[in-house]
Image (cartoon, helix red, strand yellow):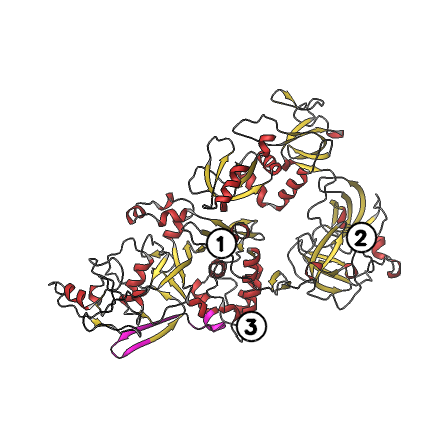
Amino acid sequence: MASANKNIYFIVIANPPNGYIEAGEICFIDKDLYEDWKKGNDTERLPLVPMGRALHTDIDVLLLKPLSLRSAELLLALETNIERLFALNDPKTLKTLEDASNLSLDSRVYVEYNGKWLKGVIRHIGNIKSCSFVEPITGVFFGVELQGEDTGEGQNNGSYLYKAYFTCPENSGIFAPFTRIKPMDHKPSAPALPTQSSPSMTSSEPLNVGDRVTFFGDKNAHHGMVMAIKDSPDGKMVLISTDKDEKGKQGGEMTVPLDCVIKEELLNKDETEKIDTSQSPDMGGVPDSEEISVGSLVQFIVGIKISYGIVRWIGYLPDYPEKSALLEVEDGSGVSDGTYKGKQYFKCPPQSGLFVKLSICRPDDRFSAAKEKEFNGNSDGAFVYVEEENIPPIRTEDVSKRLIGQMKGIQGHCNSCYMDSALFSVFSCSSVLDSLLFKSTEDQTIQSILLKGIVNPLRKHGFVPESSVMNLRKQLQNRERCPTYTTDEKDPEEFLSLIMQEILSLDPPLKLCTPSGSGHKEQSCYYYQIFMDYNHHLVLPTVQQLLEHSFFSNSLKLAEVPACLILTMPRSGKSFKMFPKIIPSIELDITGLLADGPQPCVLCGQLANEECAECFRDTLFSDTGFKYFCLKCSTQVHSHKHRRCHKTRSLHLPQGFSYSQSSGSDSRTPPREKLELFAVLCIETSHYVSFVKYGPRDTDWIFFDSMADRVGESNGYNIPEVRVCPEVGQYLHMSLAQLANQVPREMEGVAKRLFCDGYMYLYQSKSMSLYR
């Protein structure tokens, strides 16, 4: 144990690019070495030793999650890396991990074996194999002696691999990891809650066999008689013989949690006989008051647990004299969809609605100090999270703890990936289009939804539920902008243009012009679609080359430096791609694309006097860029027999520059204007994902998929995911020849999608965005 305490432990949460370590592996580092590494602070890669290996390997800290010694030991007892990752991402399993950390010898527990939960007592907690020098710790298991009616239902007598860890009768011992152990006094993490109130909330009278009760088994209230009350791993359960339903069908026997059951005599008591909980300091309840109304966020107590919800309906239920409230509960621990005795009072998701006495509710004290959050509802009654506080983009150092993992980013739903990816790309780590969120506008509803329902929650909590995006889609549809915004897939540029231009009336960030003898003819736009003529030599192009060729083919220039430049790649529809790979240009040099900017000579670098459009395709000078020359270099270049027929165009002299009469040129080197790439949207088989560059290093890339996984079928939900993808950096450093030889399906991680499926590239000017 002394050796174990000398180390710090981590679990790998995403596959590193080197391929030697897998997500789910547990690694360690000596504490002294870790302190030295922190003091050095010259790299983001931590030298760790994976369990079971003798040599260390360097792993990016963004791919790591720290573990306590106890958690590392408990997780090591799980057989596969996938099981460990699931345990970290599943709230219920994390709760089990917490419970297991507090167990001690002689604790009464349930242990799962062959699909059954058996009763027993813990007789051993620890390793069941010895540690080695390479492995300072091994998995911690629980040795359980089965008792009572479950004696003899186990697998051993307390021995493992011929070593005795405790003694018990034959076939009455079980060794199990924490995922198969539950404390016998375990309270359900998400209990099914009562309709009016549970016995623990209304009366100290015990529930007995033979009592008449009302309970919720599915969506509606049922009635019956108690047949038995039993313990289970999830708390006390009640076996009920049910009455006939409204259609005369006999319900049979049902087992439901005790907290779902209430004596009918309590429901039928006269109001004056009820216990007054409105003044109870433990309940914190308030009488029917102006403080609580439909839409209020409230808290209430069920058993010993505080629960939270939003009020969806207030009124009187049949055969119940006290005013009631229908709550859509926050943790999904309800018992209905808003139906009571066959009548729909409000439509909410199944197992989310809960009827309670209004008097036991009080305002949610989580927000009493500062009302920075609210829960509003859309037309379907789904939760729409609202974050009032304005949050800046996520900083580089906060990305790992705020954004990485499953259920991160923006949750996808019903063909929303184009919108999810666009919003995540624009707002997660950049502020270049934040003027959309704060400019004065007539359509404050959509602006408020965008700011408070999507951008602020994304930046503060790293997650936006699908209901918030659906709320935005419904607003777009309700305004008859497009009748299919809640169902159909769109193009991201169509969505961004709609928001920027038609709804929020943002000044177009991009101003183009066509240079001519009579001056510049200007046009404004919100994004630029790259069109290519087929008379080009490009095979593996960069974004820089594509933009320059498109400008050249269409005789375009930039009238000014844009704060934000949104480019869509040349393709025909969603399937045909003009190029199998496109290399992202991390920096986009737009100096040569500016109509009135000072231009450097492509040969000597001094201030240029002339532009030659016909030299554009001549790779003798450079593979990229418009061809600008000073007078001296232009004379030399165009003295060649192949260029004597070229026609040059004189450049406009920028203010502040003057040509020397003696030399014919200005000795100063003109400054270069560059834009930074901050996001890329990609499309493959009609599904959009995005890459975001969140920091200054080449490896600072994250990948976002709003529909990375799914739980359930038609009634299920999508699981969004954000993962780090530092492997992108290694490909960006490759030569063109190396990249050309890369087989897409063999590229590491998700890099293939960035290079092969790029659809929209977003660039920003850090200097110009300050003035927008």
Q: Which residue is mark 1?
A: 396
Amino acid carrying label 1: it is Thr
Instruction: Decide whether residue 506 is among the magenta residues.
Output: yes
**Residue depicted at 70% across the width and 36% down the height:** 103
Determine whether, in the image, residue 569 is placed left or right of residue 157.
left
Q: Which residue is mark 3?
A: 444
Q: Residues within 10 Å of mark 1 (few under 14, many from 20)?
A: few
Quarter of the picture containing the N terminus is top right
Q: Which residue is mark 2?
A: 201
Q: Residue 632: tell me if it is visible.
A: yes
Give the quarter of the image for residue 373. bottom right
Mark 3, mark 1: which one is toward the viewer?
1
| Badge 3 or badge 1: first in the primary sequence | 1
**Residue at far left of view:** 641
Find the magenta span and give its range.
500-521
Q: Nearer the viewer, residue 673 or 741?
A: 673
Picture coordinates of residue 316, whole percent (x, y): 78, 64
Mark 1, mark 2: which one is toward the viewer?
1
| SS category of the residue bearing label 2 | helix
Amino acid carrying label 3: it is Gln
Determine whether, in the image, residue 52 is placed left or right of residue 90.
left
Q: Does 628 appear above or below 89?
A: below
**Residue depicted at 56% across the width and 66% down the height:** 449
Task: Confirm or deny contact between disc 3 and disc 1 (CB under 8 A).
Answer: no
| SS category of the residue bearing label 3 | helix
Distance from the alpha carbon under mark 3 to that under mark 1: 31 Å
Q: Residues within 10 Å of mark 2 (few under 14, many from 20)?
A: some
